[in-house]
């Protein structure tokens, strides 16, 4: 299933690298990335495909927890369907 | 999808506490009726634990699939007075114990349906059920009870109103060691709905399917944040802003409701478009009203603000779901809403103002702590007034007041968890003893004759 991941926090070296590594470790494929710096703040939006047989959102979130803690980032993961149901009629 | 939309949604869920407040499975218990009450209770336990055995797990699975929190998983059942009527017994405590045990077994946090519908008159079973309520609420933990005493079609059963004043007092007395917590699980209704997913008033009415999934969404924080962006704008803008937020909130409810019904192999019933607050920061309906420009909830202007909010929520939500039902509107439970608690504590919000507010919102006088020495007649008087508002305005109204033994105005009472905390509110103590003693039925209003 397809997910949207958002990462927000202070810009620092290696954010994309670390996020990508965690995704690769969990067999999650990146489909699209868009990233920008807004008023010193790193903001990234990722569109990914997760293999439901291997992992679910809750466990994937857990996999990001140490990174969130260490790098002081806010990482959120939700199913694409949530966004579609809200913003598309 | 653009960046703005993505971050808007993430903020709604993560920062503004958008969540699915409850997935409630309705289960018909009509086929559990039995002359032998013990046998009926066994059937009830077996049916609930069979039909809803995967409810909690499915709720958790959906959380894991979409990433959206689902706060409560609950069950509503056929009004027990209708199921127990066939049984030869004069006390329904054992039915409530069967519900309580079933609720524990499947791991839900409330079960609703210890209910009687007496708007026009009492069956024998209704009387037995009503008399069992205080004992039931004192001896079970998860069972919620409701009694419908009025409807626009039937008028107000004033004998039932009189009885419920006494029942509420007895319930408070029997649960006084827990701040009269039993009363927090007891609702007196006018025009109760058959598909309400919210406790304590949920039951599965007559005419509903065998099993059904009803979902309640919530997001007062989302609406408040949206309104913060239109400070000072006119009311058309306010209404449009609320409508858009309600639409988005409800779409998520619809998504989850459909998915839950599919996974549980059950009919999808309704999405209840209610703005249900919790006693946590950022989840208050009162704060939405204050965001519109009121110094405090309860100030003159509050009723108009709530009327606008309630209407805009429905207009925004109705297109977002294939089937809207339940109570649908804004809830104003005092102890469960941080803004309401503050307003009541500083004297900005009175019982009378709350009564006016109930004329324009989706429910009634909800989770209000009153002095322990309030008489049964006064409570009946409060109920009668509230029922009249519902009957004449063709809407659901309800009373869930908690006369806390040993506490008076100025005291504060804690119920814990989602039930919150509340200051004891002052009650007008002029007597209505002779009015309540009359009994009988206030006839239905003229506009009930629609055919």
Image (tube, rainbow, N blue to C red):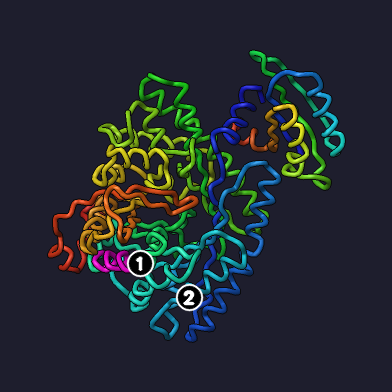
Reading the image, the residue beneath label 1 is: B171
> Vertical placement of B370 versus B276: above or below?
below
Characterize the local packing of mark 1: few (<14), some (14-19) or many (20 or more) Cα atoms within 10 angstroms: many
Horizontal and vertical percent position of residue A86:
59, 34
Q: Residue at point 33% right, 56% down?
A: B401
Horizontal and vertical percent position of residue B243:
46, 32
Q: Is residue B405 left or right of residue B217?
A: left
Q: Which residue range is magenta in the image? A: B160-173
Q: Is residue A58 left or right of residue B198?
A: right
Q: Are marks 2 and 1 on the same chain?
A: yes
Identify the mark nearer the N-term, 2 or 1. 2
> Vertical placement of B312 versus B178: above or below?
above
Judge whether residue B413 can be spotted in this image. yes
Q: Residue at point 37% right, 59% down?
A: B187
Is B171 included in the stretch rendered in magenta? yes
| SS type, badge 2 | helix
In the rendered image, the quadrant that contains the N terminus of chain B is top right
Reading the image, the residue beneath label 2 is: B95
Q: Is residue B240 left or right of residue B399?
A: right
């Amino acid at each position: 299933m397809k997910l949207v991941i958002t990462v927000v926090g202070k810009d620092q070296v290696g954010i994309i690298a670390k996020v990508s590594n965690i995704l690769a470790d969990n067999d999650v494929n990146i489909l699209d990335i868009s990233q920008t710096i807004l008023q010193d703040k790193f903001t990234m939006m990722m569109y990914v495909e997760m293999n439901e047989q291997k992992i679910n959102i809750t466990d994937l979130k857990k996999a990001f927890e140490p990174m969130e803690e260490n790098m002081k980032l806010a990482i959120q993961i939700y199913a694409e369907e949530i966004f579609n149901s809200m913003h598309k009629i | 999808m653009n960046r703005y939309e993505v971050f808007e949604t993430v903020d709604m869920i993560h920062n503004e506490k958008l969540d699915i407040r409850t997935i409630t499975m309705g289960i018909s218990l009509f086929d559990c009726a039995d002359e032998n009450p013990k046998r009926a209770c066994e059937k009830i336990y077996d049916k609930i634990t069979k039909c809803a055995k995967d409810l909690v797990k499915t709720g958790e699975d959906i959380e894991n699939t979409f990433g959206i929190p689902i706060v409560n998983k609950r069950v509503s059942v056929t009004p027990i007075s209708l199921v127990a009527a066939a049984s030869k017994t004069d006390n329904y405590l054992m039915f409530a114990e069967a519900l309580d045990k079933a609720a524990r077994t499947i791991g839900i946090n409330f079960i609703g349906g210890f209910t009687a519908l007496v708007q026009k008159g009492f069956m024998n079973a209704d009387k037995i059920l009503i008399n069992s309520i205080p004992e039931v609420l004192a001896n079970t933990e998860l069972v919620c009870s409701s009694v419908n005493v009025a409807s626009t079609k039937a008028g107000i059963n004033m004998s039932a109103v009189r009885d419920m004043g006494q029942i509420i007092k007895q319930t408070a007395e029997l649960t006084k060691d827990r701040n009269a917590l039993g009363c927090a699980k007891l609702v007196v209704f006018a025009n109760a709905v058959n598909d309400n997913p919210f406790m304590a008033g949920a039951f599965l009415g007559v005419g509903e399917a065998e099993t059904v999934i009803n979902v309640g969404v919530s997001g007062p924080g989302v609406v408040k944040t949206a309104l913060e962006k239109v400070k000072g704008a006119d009311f058309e803008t306010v209404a449009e802003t609320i409508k858009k937020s309600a639409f988005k909130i409800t779409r998520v409810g619809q998504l989850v409701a459909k998915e839950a019904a599919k996974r549980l192999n059950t009919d999808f019933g309704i999405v209840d478009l209610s703005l249900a607050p919790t006693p946590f920061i950022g989840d208050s309906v009162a704060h939405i009203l204050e965001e519109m420009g009121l110094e405090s909830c309860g100030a003159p202007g509050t009723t108009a603000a709530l009327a606008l909010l309630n209407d805009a929520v429905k207009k925004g939500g109705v297109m977002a779901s294939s089937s809207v039902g339940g109570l649908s509107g804004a809830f104003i439970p005092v102890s469960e809403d941080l803004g309401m608690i503050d307003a009541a504590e500083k004297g900005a919000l009175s019982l009378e103002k709350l009564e006016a507010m109930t004329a324009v919102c989706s429910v009634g006088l909800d989770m209000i702590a009153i002095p322990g020495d309030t008489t049964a007649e006064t409570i009946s008087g409060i109920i009668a007034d509230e029922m009249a508002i519902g009957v004449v305005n063709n809407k659901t109204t309800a009373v869930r007041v908690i006369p806390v033994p040993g506490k008076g105005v100025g005291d504060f009472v804690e119920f814990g968890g989602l039930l919150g905390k509340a200051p004891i509110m002052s009650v007008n103590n002029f007597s209505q003893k002779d009015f309540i003693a009359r009994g009988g039925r206030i006839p239905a209003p003229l506009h009930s004759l629609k055919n």
